Amino acid sequence: MADRITITLTLNGERRSFETAPGRRLLDLVRDDAGLVGAKEGCGAGECGACTVLLDGAPVASCLVLAASADGHEVVTVEGLGRAGALHPFQETLVTHGGVQCGFCTPGIAVTGAAVLARGGDAADHARLLAGNLCRCTGYAKVVEALDDAAAKEAADAPA
Amino acid sequence: MDVPVQEVIRPATIAEALAALAEREDARPIAGGTDLMVQLRDGRRRAGRLVDLGRLGLAGIRRTRDAIEVGAATTMDAIAASAEIKRSFPALASAARQVGAWPIQCRATLGGNLANGSPAADTAPPLLIAEASVTIASAAGTRRLRVADLFLGPGRTALTPGELVTSVRLPLDEPAPGERVVERFTKVGPRREQVISVVSLAGRAVIRPDGTFALVRLAFGSVAPVPVRALTAERALAGRRPDAAARRDAARAVQDDIAPIDDVRAPARYRRIAAAVLLDRFLQEAARG
């Protein structure tokens, strides 16, 4: 049995420390050590995007991130984006556009989309930026429309 | 599930990292982890100790007098977004934008893409046509190696245990007045994003005002045990115009440069045809400018 290590990071805005295994993946730290089960394990190989979280604002496949590498960094999961009654703007438009079906891929999609909005940029890139998040139910048209809509609303609300 | 390692070291300096790598035979560096974490999970690679490179300050793109230096920990996303890289090495910027999908690009590093040693490494063909080299550090000192000499076989590189790629150097090669440069990276796969290349091509052509090649460099991924320069095809094109006859000769010549295999992603025969098609498309683009 390997020695345990201490990992301290900012998780959804809160500074947290975890005693955990050296080979811990960020996904397991978030789900099993922190109890935040929004991020899902789909493929476990970085191909499906269901485990996407933000690491210092960038979307990453948390199944491929060594938890120790996130020590000292900032992690945001879907639980940190919004909550019932106060959803993130992209979560709102995912609902209004019907971009959610079974929901397994939704946390990852919400997180990637939130990163797209935070970064800004061209709506023509939305489909490409979401391409790492696979959905087997709805297809992608409604998801991309939801992101386009959220971006358009954000642009309209921004002070001139 | 945890990956099977006994310890993780997070050094703050390169010297500490090299010492941590030298100390244990089964130590391995980890940067973005996008390849290594899956390999550790599946038992395809083993490590008793992981040495995390995240605190070493190895990320960043810097222009020197005659080259661009890319730190080994620079992410694909940063490379694809870099104005310097887009201007001088557009094939590399394009390849970085086609590695996996965005969440992979935000984590995967240039050094990792090379050290992983995959024949399908998307950044390798652009680095081959740039005649780039890597700086390699170890407890014994540093050495420089051409990217062309780095890859030895599938998953195998010239890096020895304890060695670390710290940066990649791309020599700047400005065209003469009146010459135009066409540089492209293209890859073939079952979808556009999130695929391992079935065949990839990086091409750089410098074309004189009279339409002839002042220079043409071609490199392929996924068609041989290592990413390869297509020197036979380059020789078939040297000094010529990219007209139909030259394109036909190049398509024939390139077959001697590649040695594809049948695998789960494609049969060798498909790869031979696709390599010729990618080359022909590149040469047509070079003709158009």
Image (tube, rainbow, N blue to C red):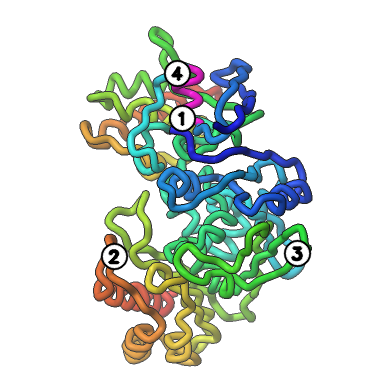
Return the x and y of residue B244 as percentages of the image width and height.
32, 87
**Rendering quarter of residue B11:** top right
Where does label 1 land, which residue?
A: A27
Return the x and y of residue B15 as percentages of the image width and height.
78, 50
Q: Are marks 3 and 4 in contact (CB under 8 Å)?
A: no
The amino acid marked with disc number 3 is Thr
Task: Identify the main secondary structure in magenta.
Answer: helix
- Extreme front residue here? A1
Return the x and y of residue B64 as percentages of the image width and height.
75, 63
Is residue B242 something one can see in this rendering? yes
Residue at (64, 74) in percent of width and height: B173
The amino acid marked with disc number 2 is Asp
Question: Is residue A30 found inside the magenta-colored segment of the image?
Answer: yes
Return the x and y of residue B213 as percentages of the image width and height.
50, 86
Label 3, secondary structure: give it.
strand
Q: Are marks 1 and 3 in contact (CB under 8 Å)?
A: no
Where does label 4 land, which residue?
A: A36
Mark identifier at residue B263: 2
Q: Are marks 2 and 1 in contact (CB under 8 Å)?
A: no
